[in-house]
Every structure is written in C-alpha cells, then in structure tokens.
C-alpha cells in the first residue's frame, strides 16, 4: 500500500518522536511504501521554529521526505499562515497514494486533496487535528479571521472528501465539533501514541536508565520534561518536591527552562542535590529516562510526552483537564480535582508498592489507546 503523509499545515521535524514521525516509522515497519510531503517548517537546535530548504531525501523514519516551498505571490510570513504550496496536485499524481493522511486541518492544500480525491475516487483520505483552544484561535484576529473565516471555510469545502477527522484529544474533539462545525459522526478519537516495550526489553531499558542516573534500589524518580515555561508549572513542581523530607526521592527535569522561570528554577535546583536538570534528550534518551522513572509530572499545560510516559509505565500526576481523563484509571492523580500538587507528590513519594500497581495500570491504558502499531492499522482498514 502507498501511504502519503501531508505535513503542509504543521511542521515535520526530522528525527523527533512526534506523531508524524512515529506513524511514518510504523507504516514503514508494516511494509508499506511511505512518502512525506512536508512544508519547509522545522525546528532549529534550540527547538525554535525555523525554515529549511526545499528538497527530497530519505528520512530517519525510513520514508522519503519531500520538502516543498510556500507559494511566493505574497510575503513568506503570510504564506506560512495561509499554507499554500505550488505543485501539490502534480506531486500526488506522481506518488499515486492509496491512503492520504493530511496532518492538521489548517491550510489551503486540503482543497488540493479534495481535487485529487475527485480525480481518483479510490484513494482514501483522512485528516487529523491537533487544534484546541489551548493552542489555536487565541487572539481576536486568529479566532475570527484566520480560523473562523479562512481555515474553517477551507475545511468545510473539503470535508466531503475526508473519510474521518481524527482528533488527538477530547478538547480537540470539542474544538473541531463546536468551533469548526464538523459533524460528530465525522469525528474519531485518535490519540497521540507511543512505543511500548515488551516485558524483558522494558526491564533492560529501565535498569540501564536507573544505572545512568545513579538511582539506588527503592529510590523513587519523578520526571518532568519539555519546553518548560510558566504554563508548565515546573516551579510549582520544584517547590512541592523540596517540601518532601525524603532522601529516597529524585527529580529529573529534561528539556529547556524558559527565560521566564530559569533564574528561580536554577536556584531551587542548585539548593537541592536530589534535583537534576539534564537539558534536551533525543527520543530514545527520553524513553530511557521515562522507563527509569516512577512518576511523570504534568501539572500544567499538555505535552505529548505524557502519552510516552504511560507507554513507559509511569504513574502520572496531571492537570485536571478533559483531555487527561481518558488516560486516568487508577494510575495517578488529577491535580485540582481531588488533590493538590503538594499532596499528590507526597503520596507518590511514600508508597512504592502503590506506584508499582499504577505502573501496571498505565501499561494497560497504553496498550488500549496508545500503541502506534494499532494506531497505524487504522489507516489500513
């Protein structure tokens, strides 16, 4: 089967572990011919948005990546919002996919896919959505003009060609249904997933990770990660951790401390030898760290690492938002619902047996919802 991933309304970041990378990797492992048609939007070494040169190359995931430029009849900054690219119809004709997954609903090229579907009705078309009111339509202009008038109208014109709109979270479902006006029967829950180790491999990776971070038997490791600014509530995590008088607990922060918190965060880290900041980690390094961990912290805004942590059998302490509820079933604490962050971390630090039970529950949830092998199969059905 030929599968085309169109990353023209969002970025495709080479070598990362985002959904776009992992689905492509799994499609390749499943024996399919896979191509990624992507914009030039990417990340630089500091995890900031940058733009790369157009071109074709073999990606780390095992699929060809075709980077296409933006159209040039308006300034680049405008075209990067309108998301219009030349030659997409011709590219699709050349690649002749059986299945198209269009990543993100925000862009002009949905209409090109509609035209391609009309010309080749046997092709199956899916579109996924990562949009919600936490990351989209936040300003007046963005909400009423960019999303309300432009993206929404393009989506409605293209909707008849789309088999299902695959939404990554409960809040995304609400956004797509209530703001974009997509009928509920055209929407499907399609969460961000993860890679799940089998039992022996998990124990090997966990042992290696705990050795790397010099963890002793019985010590409990908390982890928080990502681009950590004030909205991630990392300062609250640090303060709650330092209140716990227990020498057998550790906290590792992985990622980037934003300038709005770095001064205060570093002062707390330097004052407590149980806390370690390790900077950015590759996808494999982050998985090793999460396998070594016992508890993953996400008391603030959402991150895809949470799903990865469930696949690595972490208990979780999460913010009480609708999108976290599908991932909670006896495997952690929702902060702000029944318990505060301080008490949740205290509870986690005092009961190793409870964390072992929660690890098994996280694994069950991961197998049910998050296994990329199963998520990839949805495109073949």
Image (tube, rainbow, N blue to C red):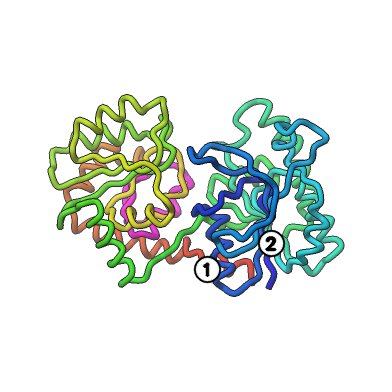
Q: Position of residue 181 (x, y in %)?
A: 70, 44
Indicate which disc, 1 or 2, sits on the residue closer to the N terminus.
Answer: 2
Badge 2 element: strand
Q: Position of residue 218 (x, y in %)?
A: 15, 55
Q: Which mark is residue 4?
A: 2
> In which quarter of the view is residue 206 placed?
bottom left
> In which quarter of the view is residue 346 placed?
top left
Badge 1, how many Cα within 10 Å: few under 14, some, many 20+? some
Residue 316 belongs to magenta span: yes
- Label 1 belongs to which residue? 374
Q: Which residues are magenta?
A: 310-334
Q: Residue at x 62, y 27 (%)?
A: 139
Q: Residue at x 43, y 49 (%)?
A: 305
155 to 58, vertically: above or below: above
Residue sitting at the far right: 119
Q: CA distance from mark 1 to mark 2?
A: 18 Å
Q: Position of residue 201 (x, y in %)?
A: 33, 69
């Amino acid at each position: 089967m030929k599968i085309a991933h169109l990353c023209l309304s969002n970025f495709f970041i080479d070598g990362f572990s985002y959904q776009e990378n992992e689905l492509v990797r799994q499609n390749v492992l499943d024996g399919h011919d896979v191509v990624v048609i992507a914009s030039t939007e990417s990340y630089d070494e500091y995890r900031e948005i940058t733009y790369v040169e157009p071109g074709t190359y073999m990606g780390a995931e095992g699929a060809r990546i075709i980077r296409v430029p933006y159209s040039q009849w308006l300034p680049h900054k405008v075209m990067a919002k309108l998301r219009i690219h030349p030659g997409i119809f011709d590219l699709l004709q050349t690649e002749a996919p059986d299945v198209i997954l269009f990543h993100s609903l925000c862009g002009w090229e949905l209409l090109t896919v509609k035209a391609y579907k009309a010309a080749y009705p046997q092709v199956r078309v899916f579109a996924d959505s990562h949009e919600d009111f936490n990351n989209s339509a936040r300003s007046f202009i963005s909400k009423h003009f960019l999303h309300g008038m432009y993206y929404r109208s393009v989506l409605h014109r293209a909707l008849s060609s789309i088999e299902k709109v695959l939404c990554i979270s409960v809040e995304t479902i609400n956004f797509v249904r209530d703001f974009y006006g997509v009928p509920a029967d055209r929407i499907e829950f399609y969460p961000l997933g993860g890679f799940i180790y089998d039992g022996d491999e998990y124990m090997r990776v966990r042992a290696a990770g705990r050795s790397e971070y010099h963890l002793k038997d019985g010590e409990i490791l908390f982890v928080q990660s990502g681009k950590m600014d004030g909205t991630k509530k990392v300062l609250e995590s640090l303060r709650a951790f330092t209140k716990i008088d227990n020498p057998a607990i550790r906290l590792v922060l992985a990622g980037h401390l934003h300038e709005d918190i770095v001064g205060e965060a570093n002062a707390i880290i330097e004052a407590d030898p149980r806390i370690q900041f390790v900077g950015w980690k590759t996808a494999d390094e982050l998985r090793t760290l999460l396998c070594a961990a016992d508890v993953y912290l996400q008391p603030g805004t959402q991150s895809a690492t949470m799903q990865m942590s469930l696949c690595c059998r972490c208990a979780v302490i999460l913010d009480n938002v609708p999108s976290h509820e599908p991932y909670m079933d006896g495997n952690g604490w929702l902060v702000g619902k029944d318990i505060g962050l301080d008490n949740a971390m205290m509870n986690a630090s005092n009961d190793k047996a409870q964390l072992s039970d929660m690890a098994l529950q996280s694994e069950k949830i991961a197998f049910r919802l998050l296994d990329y092998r199963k998520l990839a199969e949805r495109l073949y059905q």
